[in-house]
Amino acid sequence: MIDISIIFKLAAVGIIITIVCQVLKKSDRDDVATVVSIVGIVIALTVAVTMIGDLFETVREIFGVYG
């Protein structure tokens, strides 16, 4: 089952990444801000792919499909 804390963790990562990027852009470090944004996206996608994998595994168990 999907835990609601994962959604809060993803939101926290998004907020932190946004704040760091804004601070870096204000200090004329756009290149580093871009790298930080990409790292944040990779972290969020990693969590999302893990959750999707768990979803498929749960569906497979529910319908009794074993491959």
Image: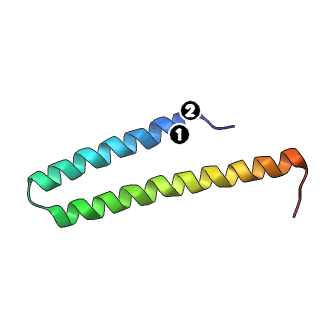
Indicate the quadrant containing the C terminus: top left, top right, bottom left or bottom right.
bottom right
Q: Which mark is residue 6?
A: 1
Q: Residue furthest top?
A: 4
The residue lying at 82 percent from left, 52 percent from top is 60
Image quarter in which the N terminus is found: top right
Please say if 15 is above or below 28: above
Query: Which residue in the structure is indicated by mark 2?
Result: 4
Q: Is 53 rendered above or below residue 18?
A: below
| Cβ–Cβ under 8 Å for marks 2 and 1 | yes
Specify whether 29 is left or right of 13: left
> 10 Å neighbourhood of mark 2: few (<14), some, or many (≥20)?
few
In the rendered structure, which amino acid carries the disc numbered 1? Ile
Helix or strand or loop: what does disc 2 sit on?
A: helix
Alpha carbon distance from label 2 to label 1: 5 Å
Q: Which mark is residue 35?
A: none
- Residue at point 79%, 48% (across, down): 59
From the top left corner, tell me how far across and down residue 64 is, in percent. 91, 50
Disc 2 marks a residue whose amino acid type is Ile
Q: Quadrant of residue 66?
A: bottom right
